[in-house]
Image: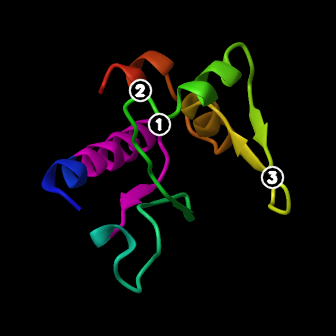
């Protein structure tokens, strides 16, 4: 993995950890992003293991599908369903308090 790619990943992980902490949720980065036996993931948020993916425009279709909706439900054949939601909604569901402006201005 290139240094540029690692840096982008680190920035994304840091963005989410700061957003969760500012919202009153317990969140930490996993050392070495899951490369050890500690936890296989990038973050631990309120006891849940999270994987962080950052793409320049790779998720634009997901954002389009989420416009004016609370949740996006996804399912591939033979796989468990997935729920995609805006960060602010996740924070509220997990008991945190977030301001959409506060979270999004820090990019």
- Image: magenta residue range: 8-30
Occupied quadrant, residue 106: top left
Residue at mark 1 to residue at mark 2: CA–CA distance: 9 Å
Give the mark nearest the N terminus, 1 or 3: 1
Image coordinates for residue 103, horizontal then vertical, percent: 41, 26
In front: 75, or 43? 75
Q: Earlier in the sequence, mark 3 or mark 2?
A: 3
> In the drawing, does residue 46 fall left or right of residue 81?
left
Q: Are marks 1 and 2 in contact (CB under 8 Å)?
A: yes
Q: Secondary structure at mark 1?
A: loop
* Residue lying at 80% horizontally and 48% vertically, measured from the top left: 75
Q: Which residue is mark 3?
A: 81
* Residue 26 painted magenta: yes
| Residue 96 vertical placement versus 68 (above, below) | below
Would you identify the image quadrant in which residue 87 lies? top right
Compared across the picture, whether 58 is left or right of 64 comes to left
Task: Please tell me the numbered disc located at residue 23.
Answer: 1
- 98 vs 28: above or below: above
Q: Height in image: 5 above or below 101? A: below
Is disc 3 placed on a helix, strand or loop? Answer: loop
Single out the mark in the foreground, 3 or 2: 3
Distance CA(mark 3)–CA(mark 2): 27 Å
Numbered badge on residue 64: none
Q: Counting other residues with Cα less than 10 Å from the Cα at mark 1, is it few (<14), some (14-19), or many (20 or more)?
A: some
């Amino acid at each position: 993995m290139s240094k540029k790619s690692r840096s982008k990943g680190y920035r994304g992980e840091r963005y989410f950890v700061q957003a969760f902490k500012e919202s009153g949720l317990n969140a930490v980065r996993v050392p070495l992003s899951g490369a050890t036996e500690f936890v296989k993931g990038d973050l631990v948020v309120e006891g849940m293991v999270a994987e962080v993916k950052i793409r320049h425009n790779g998720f634009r279709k997901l954002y389009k599908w989420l416009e004016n909706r609370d949740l996006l439900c996804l399912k591939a054949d033979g796989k468990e369903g997935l729920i995609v939601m805006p960060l602010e909604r996740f924070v509220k569901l997990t008991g945190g308090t977030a301001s959409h402006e506060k979270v999004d201005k820090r990019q």
